[in-house]
Image (spheres, helix red, strand yellow):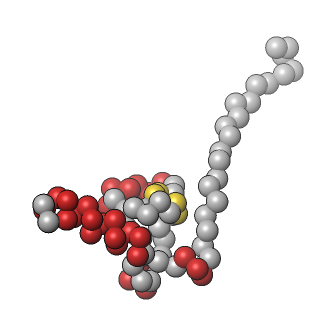
Amino acid sequence: MSELETATPTETIIQPTLDDGDHDRFAHFARKTDITKSAVTGRPIVALCGKVWVPGRNPDRYPVCPACKEIYQHKKAEETGG
């Protein structure tokens, strides 16, 4: 490299497509640690149902995602042996 050239490191940032449409306004279940990390970093997390999103709204304002609820109940039943 000559004296006039400079090297600038580059970083490719991939932004996931986040769907915020009215058809998917549910409160999703995810790990508490993931939710906390997302609050700090702003990075998306994955709900039990597979939805990828950045938590930011009050979940009490929305109905619980039926798929998340079913998966959660199934896991709880396996843990308790019921």
Q: Position of residue 29 (x, y in %)?
A: 37, 67
Q: Position of residue 24 (x, y in %)?
A: 55, 76
Q: Name the residue at 87% across, 21% down.
A: 4
Q: Nearer the viewer, residue 61 or 23?
A: 23
Q: Quadrant of residue 18?
A: bottom right
Q: Residue furthest front?
A: 82
- Looking at the image, is 82 positioned above or below residue 10? below
Q: Name the residue at 34% across, 72% down.
A: 69
In the picture, measured across the screen, residue 73 lies left or right of residue 15, that is left
Examine the rendering and report whether any part of residue 42 can be seen: no
Q: Name the residue at 52% across, 79% down.
A: 25
Q: Position of residue 77 (x, y in %)?
A: 19, 65
Q: Nearer the viewer, residue 25 or 13?
A: 25
In the picture, measured across the screen, residue 70 lies left or right of residue 61, that is left
In the picture, measured across the screen, residue 26 lies left or right of residue 22, that is left
The C terminus: image quadrant: bottom left
Q: Position of residue 51 (x, y in %)?
A: 50, 63
Q: Nearer the viewer, residue 62 or 68?
A: 68
- Looking at the image, is 10 positioned above or below residue 77? above
Q: Nearer the viewer, residue 48 or 57?
A: 48
- Looking at the image, is 14 positioned above or below residue 17? above
Q: Name the residue at 32% across, 61% down.
A: 32
Examine the rendering and report whether any part of residue 41 can be seen: yes
Q: Quadrant of residue 74?
A: bottom left
The N terminus: image quadrant: top right
- Looking at the image, is 38 positioned above or below residue 28? above
